[in-house]
Image (cartoon, coloured by chain):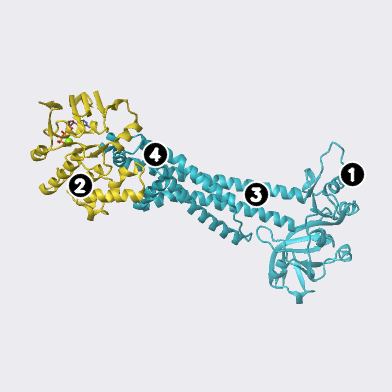
Chain colours: A yellow, B cyan
């Protein structure tokens, strides 16, 4: 088996709310190997999004260590983290997080902008990514002019446009009907077959079953 | 990210909030426009003063009384005659002036009546347009004859055919013997609005005594103004019997001094106006800062998203800085255009024309860039420092 691309060792994420502390993640240890397709499942509030934010280098654990492709993330500075987010990771947010008043095309092209890719090339690649998600006819629509499911697919397109080694998707099919959901899953399987590592969060047992491995979270802990 | 990408981002952002961008720029527009306009007006004034003083005659010395006796007048007609004999002096004209109402029939005008001698025309560089100027016999006899400035003649409705007509100066009848060529110029003192009469008649009818208000001296070409000034000073001190420890009771102005004084006053004025205008530029800059800070707040999520997809702190910094710079530079350019229009308009009204100064424009552009950087950096840094997850959670 190949080396782990993701390795969490005793990771906790505790939110301090005044005098109450919420342990959203509690001593989680976990390895994901390169080329794996992992589904994270668990009830609402079990810490799935919290874990995903840590995996995506958006948030830092309060305890434990996270190593990504052999590098300890704690040791990285802000610019190095930005570089990891730019080059290695494609992130699909549960709440889409598209740029407001910005067309679908420009939204999808934004990660390429920060890779220093030129305008024409950005447009070409963003158009192709949107095309793969069946949005070729919605390039110039702003988020408010798109349905929830379409916004979700724009968010997926933005995550895959840089062809990242690691795709982290927080409920990428949550707002899609079964047909569109199946298409997004087919796309992920195709990317996985091409060697990309995929971690996705889902509530849907059918979606989870399509993954190679399932990780169950409950109250911030990995269940057996 | 290249500057072109950043500019494109900034422009598309400004396009989505046009009214706000316009209002923000307004502060800089007003600031830059007033700096450009006021500096333009200041330069126009200086140029105008200089050219007017030159028109008065470059070899003119003006002597006037100073000190305790100034109001009584320490200069006399005899002083004037004595000065005429100094080496390097071409002509001397004593002057006594008074403000009087001049009437001709039912028409009247308030003007300056200058009592002087025949040399006045050459000393003050006036040419006669119609008739004759005062003659030495007429002055010696104190005849009631008058030569009118072009403006005064106009005001009284006197033309070439009216030579010899009678006018009343402060009620005293005078005969018009000539009309002067207009010198032109406008503003605070019109050199063509005057009535020139023999000095003796002004002393006799209007001011009394035998002192004179000023003595105009024209020096010969090639004579050193400084030497002539020194000679006249020595002569007058001697005539006024001043002890070596006494101050002069008169003052000799030469054209160069006057020019320097006037130019320095105009320069100070321009500086003062520019300073006041700069304050409005600072206020405009604070407007930009305010908007940028609000904008960073409002766009916290956007910043979070950009960071999540790979933007570094410096990319965000550059984005917000370029936005602020675009606002201030655009405002600055519009301000320059408005300022130039205003100063051209004022120059035209005031009649001193309009000079486009590249320095002013350069300084204005530089100023608006500085405003953009100074007031844009702080909000931009605030934006760049935000932590992605905090920014994404911001409501
Ligand atoms: N910023 C925060 N401050 C305090 N507590 C938080 C914060 N974010 C999440 N939590 C808490 O951490 C726990 C885990 O939240 P998380 O978003 O990871 O759940 P989740 O598994 O993704 O749920 P869902 O399936 O509903 O998306 C929750 O109990 C939540 O209340
Ligand atoms: Mg969640």
Which residue is nearer to you in this view: B183 or A38?
Answer: A38
Mark 3 secondary-structure assignment: helix
Question: From mark 4 to mark 1, how far is it between C-alphas?
Answer: 77 Å
Mark 4 secondary-structure assignment: helix
- Chain where mark 1 sits: B
Name the residue carrying label 3: B266
The residue depicted at 85 percent of the width and 62 percent of the height is B118
- Chain where mark 2 sits: A
Vertical placement of B194 versus B80: above or below? below
Callout in the foreground (4, 2):
2
Name the residue carrying label 2: A153
Question: From mark 4 to mark 2, how far is it between C-alphas?
Answer: 30 Å
Q: Residues within 10 Å of mark 2 (few under 14, many from 20)?
A: many
Name the residue carrying label 1: B238
Q: Is residue A220 left or right of residue B372?
A: left
Q: Looking at the rendering, which quadrant does residue B210 occupy?
A: bottom right
Relative image position of residue B201 (x, y in whole percent)? 82, 62
Residue B317 has which mark?
4
Please identify the quadrant where the C terminus of chain B is shown.
top left
Vertical placement of B283 versus B40: above or below? above
Mark 2 secondary-structure assignment: helix
Question: From mark 2 to mark 1, how far is it between C-alphas?
Answer: 105 Å
Question: From mark 4 to mark 3, how far is it between C-alphas?
Answer: 44 Å
Question: From mark 1 to mark 3, how far is it between C-alphas?
Answer: 37 Å
Relative image position of residue A34 (x, y in whole percent)? 21, 32
């Amino acid at each position: 088996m190949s080396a782990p691309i993701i390795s969490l060792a005793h990771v906790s994420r505790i939110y301090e709310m005044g005098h109450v502390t919420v342990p959203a993640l509690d001593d989680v240890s976990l390895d994901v190997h390169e080329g794996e397709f992992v589904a994270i499942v668990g009830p609402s509030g079990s810490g799935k999004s919290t874990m995903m934010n840590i995996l995506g280098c958006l948030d830092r654990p309060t305890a434990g260590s996270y190593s990504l492709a052999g590098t300890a993330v704690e040791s990285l500075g802000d610019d190095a983290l930005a570089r990891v987010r730019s080059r290695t990771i494609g992130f699909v947010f549960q709440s889409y997080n598209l740029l407001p008043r910005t067309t679908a095309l420009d939204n999808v092209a934004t990660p390429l902008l920060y890779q220093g890719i030129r305008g024409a090339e950005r447009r070409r690649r963003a158009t192709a990514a949107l095309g793969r998600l069946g949005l070729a006819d919605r390039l110039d629509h702003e988020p408010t002019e798109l349905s929830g499911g379409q916004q979700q697919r724009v968010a997926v397109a933005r995550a895959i446009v840089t062809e990242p080694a690691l795709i982290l998707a927080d409920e990428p099919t949550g707002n899609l009907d079964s047909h569109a959901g199946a298409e997004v899953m087919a796309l992920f399987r195709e990317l996985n077959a091409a060697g990309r590592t995929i971690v996705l969060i889902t509530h849907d047992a059918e979606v989870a079953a399509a993954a190679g491995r399932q990780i169950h979270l409950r109250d911030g802990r990995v269940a057996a | 990210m290249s500057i072109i990408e950043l500019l494109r981002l900034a422009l598309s952002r400004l396009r989505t909030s046009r009214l706000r961008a316009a209002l923000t720029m307004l502060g800089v527009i007003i600031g830059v426009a007033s700096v450009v306009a006021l500096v333009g007006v200041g330069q126009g004034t200086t140029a105008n003063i200089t050219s007017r003083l030159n028109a008065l005659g470059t070899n003119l010395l003006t002597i006037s009384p100073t000190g305790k006796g100034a109001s009584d007048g320490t200069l006399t007609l005899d002083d004037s005659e004595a000065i005429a004999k100094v080496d390097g002096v071409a002509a001397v004209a004593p002057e006594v002036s008074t403000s009087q109402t001049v009437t001709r029939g039912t028409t009247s005008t308030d003007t300056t009546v200058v009592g002087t001698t025949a040399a006045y025309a050459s000393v003050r560089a006036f040419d006669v347009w119609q008739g004759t100027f005062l003659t030495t016999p007429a002055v010696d006899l104190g005849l009631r004859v008058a030569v009118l400035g072009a403006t005064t003649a106009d005001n009284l409705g006197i033309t070439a055919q009216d030579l010899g007509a009678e006018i009343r100066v402060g009620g005293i009848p005078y005969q018009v013997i000539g009309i002067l060529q207009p010198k032109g110029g406008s503003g605070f003192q019109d050199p063509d609005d005057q009535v020139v009469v023999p000095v003796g008649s002004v002393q006799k009818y209007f001011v009394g005594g035998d002192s004179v208000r000023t003595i105009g001296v024209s020096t010969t070409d090639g004579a050193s103004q400084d030497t002539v000034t020194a000679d006249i000073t020595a002569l007058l001190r001697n005539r006024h019997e001043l002890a070596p420890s006494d101050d002069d009771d008169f003052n000799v102005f030469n054209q160069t001094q006057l020019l320097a004084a006037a130019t320095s006053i105009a320069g100070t004025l321009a500086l003062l106006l520019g300073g006041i205008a700069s304050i409005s530029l600072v206020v405009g800059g604070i407007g930009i800062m305010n908007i940028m800070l609000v904008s960073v707040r409002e766009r916290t999520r956007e910043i979070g998203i950009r960071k999540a997809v790979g933007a570094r702190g410096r990319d965000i910094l550059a984005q917000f800085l370029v936005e602020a710079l675009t606002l201030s530079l655009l405002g600055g350019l519009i301000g320059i255009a408005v300022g130039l229009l205003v100063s051209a308009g004022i120059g035209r009204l005031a009649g001193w024309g309009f000079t486009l100064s590249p320095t002013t424009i350069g300084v204005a552009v530089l100023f608006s860039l500085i405003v953009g950087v100074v007031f844009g950096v702080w909000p931009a840094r605030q934006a760049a420092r935000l932590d992605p997850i905090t920014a994404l959670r911001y409501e």
